[in-house]
Amino acid sequence: MVAVVLAREAKSVIIGEGAAPEVISRIRDVLAASGGIGEVRDLRTLHSGRRTCWSPRP
């Protein structure tokens, strides 16, 4: 059981994981308030550290 938990955690550290829903919501709010952006359909993020969140350009 311990090995399964460690494997899951190691995978998210190596590959990265998506940002938390509240972070994605905040990103959408900031984009909507900035003007010039009509709609965000598919927001992809990669949370790669305690305070680092990336969103690649299309």
Image: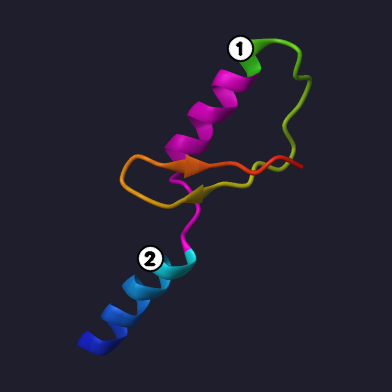
| Residue type highlighted by circle 2 | Val
| Earlier-in-chain disc, 2 versus 1 | 2
Using the image, determine if residue 37 lies above or below residue 23.
Answer: above
Magenta residue span: 16-31
Label of residue 13 in the image? 2
Using the image, determine if residue 8 lies above or below residue 35.
Answer: below
Q: Residue at x 64, y 18 (%)?
A: 32
Instruction: Please state the horizontal and vertical placement of residue 47, each as a whole percent of the image.
Output: 45, 50
Any magenta on residue 22?
A: yes
Q: Quadrant of residue 28?
A: top right
Residue at the spot of label 1: 33
Any magenta on residue 18?
A: yes
Label of residue 43 in the image? none
Instruction: Please state the horizontal and vertical placement of residue 30, each as a whole percent of the image.
Output: 55, 19
- In-image side of 55 versus 2 (left or right): right
Number of disc labels: 2
Q: CA distance from mark 2 to mark 1?
A: 32 Å
Q: Quadrant of the C terminus?
A: top right
Q: What secondary structure characterizes most of the magenta part?
A: helix
Question: Mark 1, residues whose alpha carbon is within 10 Å: few (<14), some, or many (≥20)?
Answer: few
